[in-house]
Image: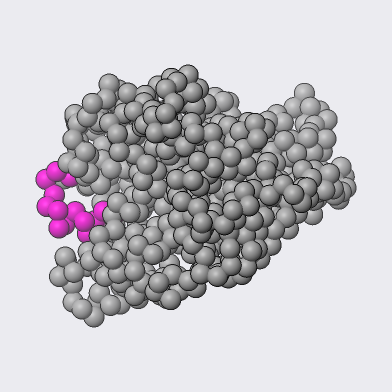
Amino acid sequence: MANIKIKNLNYQYPETKNLALNNINLEIPQGQFVLLVGGSGSGKSTLIRSIAGLVPNFYGGKYGGEVYLDDKEIRQIDRRSFVQQVGMVFQDPESQLVMTNLEEEIVFGLENLELPNSLMKRRVMEVSSALSLSDYKNKFIPELSGGQKQKVALASVLAMQPDILLLDEPTSQLDPIAGEEILTMVRRLNEENGITVVLTEQRLERCFHLADRVLVMERGEIIYDHHDPKTIAEWAVDNKTPFIPPLAKLFANVGYREVPVTVKHGREILRSYRNKLKPIRIDSEKRAEKFEKTEEACLVDIKNLWFTYPNGKEVLKNINLKIKPGDFIVVMGENGGGKTTLMKHINGLLKPSRGHVKVLGKDTKKMSIEELSSIIGYLSQDPNDYLFLPTVREEVAFTLEKLGIKDDRIQNKILQKLQIDSLKERNPRDLSTGQRQRVALASILVTKPKLLLLDEPTRGLDYQLKEALGEVLLKLKEEGMTIFMIAHDVEFAAEYADEIILLDGGSIIARGNKYEMLTNSTFYSPQISKLFHNFVENVVTLDQGEVILRNMIGSDQKEKYA
């Protein structure tokens, strides 16, 4: 097994002014679990790519410094030996999947190593079982959901049994249950097999407590390095950085000296104030916006929708759904449950096998894609689907030109809202995943659609950018836009949605306001709800949590630290 040593590493992407990595010096001993934290574009992915030997080989640009595995510089290690030592899972699984059959994809790397057939079969069986992919081994990969593809990419890497595992947001497209399972499995591999893990992740509530060491990156530099996540959280609070989990942020916002990083620790603090804790219940009907709207106002009306793909797989089963003006709905559920397929019926990319979908009272079977796109804006899981021009400015301008609009003010306003106005002259494909996501969204928002469909829009966004996106969406809602969104990000849904729909096996299992849906769930609930469970019910947002926590511990806290 190898130690990782980085000396004086600098890197600059082609046609950019700033260094993506600036004088990185770092040692990672074998068997350590390292979490890389930082904003979108801070250099996390680039650092991982450097360890994987992809920078500058596959990206070009200016490179200086050395990366060693043990005492050997990676450029001196032959590729066959290197891929047996280092495995990497990319942010975008599509970029590393080369086969069309799931089992063939997993076995592809093993075949290149010329392993015995019996050993390859055993490894395929092991990783397929561990990642709940056994039922999909003969599936056509393009038909899998984004989350399932992410699992396939991870399975392909784990089958190689590397000594070093580099994971660039490996759970970004996974539902909450699958995401927790994957990270728990990775931690187990780290503890029991001694695999070195370097992980980047934006949803820190999932993994902050798992790491042996946390590195904070900003503008291509490592600005803080510590082995105790709790100390890192306290440092982040003191320095007003946004890279802390919601739970730690809650306690920091009320001025509590101790900053918990797990729900268990937070509940221990609350129990210490048991004399002030009286179980109460917040009325979800009062907290939620009025659930029933006027019957005549209906933007989308879906009745008895069934859909079967040409391969015979039945994906949607008797869906009945109304979307009304001003709704902010988030659809959640397991990967492969039919969420994206449902969304593609709303924008007309797919047509029902049975039943109907009506938009503004007109059946989508009788509407062209052009007609529907004048009403509906759609952002898919993969922002690369939208990016084909050389600059961000041209990408956004292209959409306006198609509509016959020449107004730079609209373009500039949207770019500023999404905090990408400084990237106007950059090539979109040179940007981070989170930045590309915002560029794609900008090209849609300039059209001012009545209904905005968003498929995993928070993928690749740090807490600060997610908050900015949430505020933009709330502002658009105030201006009359309706939002229908697919998300695995429970924390985002809790803060910004009005209603939650749970979809499972192609059927709507439940629909309701976010307070009743997210506080009565074991897995689909935010950290804040888990913290206050059985203390105060129907708590889902940070603002709610702050008010309650101040009342519970405020006066005692002042006395304790006076």
Left or right: residue 198 compared with residue 339:
left
Q: How many numbered marks, from 0 up?
A: 0
**Closer-to-camera residue (235/219):** 219
Q: Which quadrant: the C terminus?
A: top right
Q: Residue at x 39, y 29 (%)?
A: 401
Figure quadrant of residue 355: bottom right
Q: In the rendered image of this protein, does residue 417 appear above or below residue 547? A: above
In this view, the residue farthest toward the front is: 366
| Residue plotted at (44% across, 42% down) | 460
Q: Is residue 182 above or below residue 3?
A: below
Q: Position of residue 190 (x, y in %)?
A: 40, 57
Q: Quadrant of the N terminus?
A: bottom left
Q: Is residue 468 located in the magenta-colored stretch of the structure?
A: no
Q: Residue at left 32%, top 23%?
A: 425
Q: Give x and y (percent) for residue 515.
A: 74, 50
- Is residue 77 part of the magenta span, yes or no? yes
Q: Picture quarter containing residue 114? A: bottom left
Residue 367 point in image, percent of width and height: 50, 53
Residue lying furthest top: 409
| Residue 478 sits above or below residue 134 on the image | above
**Residue at coordinates 27% horizontally, 21% vertically from top-left?**
17
410 vs 88, nearest the viewer: 410
Q: Quadrant of residue 333?
A: bottom right
Q: Is residue 268 left or right of residue 120?
A: right
| Residue 444 visible somewhere in the drawing | yes
Q: Magenta stretch: give its range.
A: 73-87
In the foreground, 513 or 233: 513
* Residue 184 visible in the current orientation: no
Quick check: 326 left or right of 79? right
